Image (tube, grey):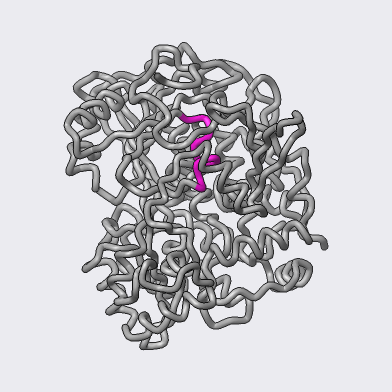
């Protein structure tokens, strides 16, 4: 029998989500399940043994179902069908620089296509339109080698992560910073330097050095069985995809402050979402809400590094402003933004914003005082309970911690963890978080109060391992052989693997690159366009997902909510 991603996604929507007691899907949404239709090519696009395609497709189906429930309850309008294109769902998981192209006109009026295959032209275009916040050159192969798996002295594996400032991890490992090594080092020259440093430590010793001493991201690479023996897993094992806490603060039931701005076409229009996030997972939450009509203001610091290469994708549909939390006047502007916000999404170091008076308890107290509830989303790596709740972490760290990397390595016939190529847990955590926000909006419309939503990469990855898993051996063998038989190793990081695996999709999965899967979007301040994947979820009837304002870099807008929530730029 031919394996089919759409057919398996349909099954998993029920077994992994709707019938999953940990996820607690409301009966009203379960009753809508027959409206979902999965379409797409049967064959998975990526040579990855984990069922990423099916995972994101089912999560997007839940997202669509939840939005339809909101449409029916708020606008009293039936939606007959929700279509999930599993090809688009797989495209959704790709790192933005590998799939976004830019289109501008040359002096003769002809279209000029700029993509990442021409690195020089791509970088020149990008830096002209998106503010460069890579303050520590994290994209160099030497610096990015701080984000890899290495073997330790006791023959275990450890995933280091230099975050957005690799110098701290380099100092911790006692290796030279970039300015003290040969310029433009290759990956083959770089990773042995890190490996030599890491193998001087036992895994437990290195874990304490990274997390406790230097407060950097890093984890021992566990198998799934080993991870389930940790206190961290046990403290969070009751959680499904996210965990929502109802706060009975006496505020009245309502949809949102500007709920009259919404429509069936743009169901979340009028919803003010404050985005205090970084990188991918939490920004995907807010980007998804923008896709359905919400007004999103992203706040970043002018002093902190950010991964600017993501902004063409992650800043889609958002205003962006810069505020320095160390300045009292900027804090006052941020508090004013919070005062008007219906939803606040935060994705910085766990509990970091509390020191500025912007933590969970502060926001809940503000909501109670203003007499209007708030939905507060916090996203981290390890989960919000247990001894590692305050640790920082990223997608690769969660994959290594939860045993996902080991699953991928073992499927390749290796007794070692291998990072599974795509930022899958980032994008899927974001999708799950957005769905939780939509559900909280529905609940608040009748139950009143405020809602705290806990999202974590480990929550998603635990569900992935338990409920979605890997392809059966015969399916995986056929898939792997048909995609060029790639065998990445433990020391290959994502920057090394991205171009290789995306090239394989162009060669062996051409349907992922069909022009009709893409759309053009605007870029602030230029007639040039960007071309990226369309929305994964399609609704029959009037509802049209999409971005109403053009993409932009950080700090492009003034830090306040405009009266007209349709303006392209806040000045």
Q: Residue at x 26, y 73 (%)?
A: 209
Residue 270 found in image quarter = top left
Residue occupying the far front of the picture: 107
Q: Residue at x 28, y 50 (%)?
A: 350
Magenta stretch contains residue 556: no
What span is colored magenta in the figure?
309-318
Residue 316 sits inside the magenta stretch: yes
Q: Position of residue 481 (x, y in %)?
A: 76, 72
Vertical placement of residue 238 versus 226, above or below:
above
Q: Does residue 465 appear left or right of residue 197 in this picture? A: right
Point out residue 380 in the picture as x, y percentages from the top left corner.
Answer: 36, 51
Of the pair 64 and 559, the residue shown nearer to us: 559
Tell me the quadrant of the picture where the C terminus can be found. top left
Dominant SS in magenta: helix
- In the image, 178 versus 366, the foreground residue is 178
Q: Relative to 142, does residue 320 appear above or below in the rendering?
A: above
Q: Name above or below for residue 527 compared with residue 270.
A: below
Image point 35% across, 35% down: which residue? Answer: 299
In the rendered image, which quarter contains the N terminus? bottom right
Q: Quadrant of residue 248?
A: top left
Residue 497's place in the image compared with 16, above or below, is: below
Residue projecting furthest to the bottom:
154
* Direction from residue 277 to residue 367 in the image, left or right: left
Can see residue 311? yes
Estimate the x, y position of residue 258 in percent, counting from the top left: 41, 15
| Residue at 37 percent of width and 63 percent of height | 162
- On the question of residue 82 being in view, the answer is no
Q: Nearer the viewer, residue 405 or 198?
A: 198
């Amino acid at each position: 029998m031919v394996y089919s991603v759409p057919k398996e996604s349909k099954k998993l929507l029920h077994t992994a989500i709707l019938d999953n007691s940990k996820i607690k899907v409301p009966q009203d949404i379960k009753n809508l399940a027959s409206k979902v239709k999965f379409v797409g090519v049967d064959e998975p696009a990526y040579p990855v043994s984990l069922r990423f395609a099916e995972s994101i497709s089912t999560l997007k189906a839940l997202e669509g179902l939840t939005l339809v429930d909101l449409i029916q309850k708020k606008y009293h309008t039936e939606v007959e069908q929700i279509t999930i294109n599993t090809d688009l769902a797989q495209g959704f998981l790709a790192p933005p620089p590998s799939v976004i192209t830019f289109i501008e006109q040359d002096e003769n009026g002809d279209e000029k296509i700029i993509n990442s295959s021409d690195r020089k032209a791509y970088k020149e275009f990008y830096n002209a339109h998106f503010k460069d916040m890579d303050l520590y050159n994290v994209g160099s192969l030497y610096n990015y080698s701080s984000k890899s798996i290495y073997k330790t002295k006791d023959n275990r594996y450890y995933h280091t992560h230099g975050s957005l400032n690799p110098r701290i991890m380099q100092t911790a490992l006692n290796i030279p910073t970039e300015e003290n090594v040969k310029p433009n080092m290759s990956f083959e020259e770089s990773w042995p330097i890190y490996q030599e440093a890491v193998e001087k430590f036992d895994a437990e010793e290195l874990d304490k050095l990274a997390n406790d001493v230097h407060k950097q991201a890093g984890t021992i690479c566990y198998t799934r069985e080993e991870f389930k023996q940790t206190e961290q897993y046990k403290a969070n094992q009751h959680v499904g995809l996210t965990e929502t806490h109802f706060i009975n603060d006496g505020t009245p039931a309502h949809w949102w402050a500007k709920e009259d701005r919404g429509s069936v076409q743009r169901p979340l229009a009028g919803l003010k979402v404050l985005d205090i996030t970084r990188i991918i997972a939490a920004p995907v939450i807010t980007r998804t809400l923008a896709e359905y009509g919400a007004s999103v203001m992203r706040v970043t610091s002018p002093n902190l590094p950010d991964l600017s290469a993501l902004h063409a994708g992650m800043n889609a549909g958002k205003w962006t402003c810069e505020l320095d939390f160390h300045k009292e006047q900027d804090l006052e502007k941020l508090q004013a933004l919070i005062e008007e916000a219906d939803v606040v999404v935060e994705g910085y170091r766990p509990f970091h914003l509390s020191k500025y008076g912007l933590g969970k308890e502060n926001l809940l107290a503000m909501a109670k005082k203003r007499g209007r509830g708030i939905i507060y989303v916090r996203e981290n790596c390890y989960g919000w309970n247990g001894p590692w709740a305050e640790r920082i972490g990223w997608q690769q760290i969660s994959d290594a911690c939860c045993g996902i990397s080991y699953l991928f390595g073992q499927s390749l016939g290796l007794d070692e963890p291998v990072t599974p190529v795509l930022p899958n847990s980032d994008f899927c955590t974001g999708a799950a978080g957005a769905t939780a926000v939509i559900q909280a909006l529905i609940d608040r419309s009748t139950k009143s109060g405020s809602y705290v939503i806990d999202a974590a990469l480990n929550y998603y990855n635990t569900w992935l391992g338990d409920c979605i898993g890997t392809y059966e051996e015969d399916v995986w063998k056929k898939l792997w052989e048909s995609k060029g038989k790639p065998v990445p190793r433990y020391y290959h990081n994502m920057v090394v693997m991205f171009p290789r695996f995306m090239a394989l999709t162009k060669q062996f999965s051409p349907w992922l690159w069909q022009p009709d899967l893409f759309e053009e979007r605007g870029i602030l301040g230029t007639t040039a366009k960007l071309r990226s994947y369309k929305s994964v979820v399609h609704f029959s009837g009037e509802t049209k997902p999409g971005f109403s304002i053009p993409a932009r870099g950080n700090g492009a807008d003034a830090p306040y909510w405009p009266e007209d929530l349709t303006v392209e730029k806040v000045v």
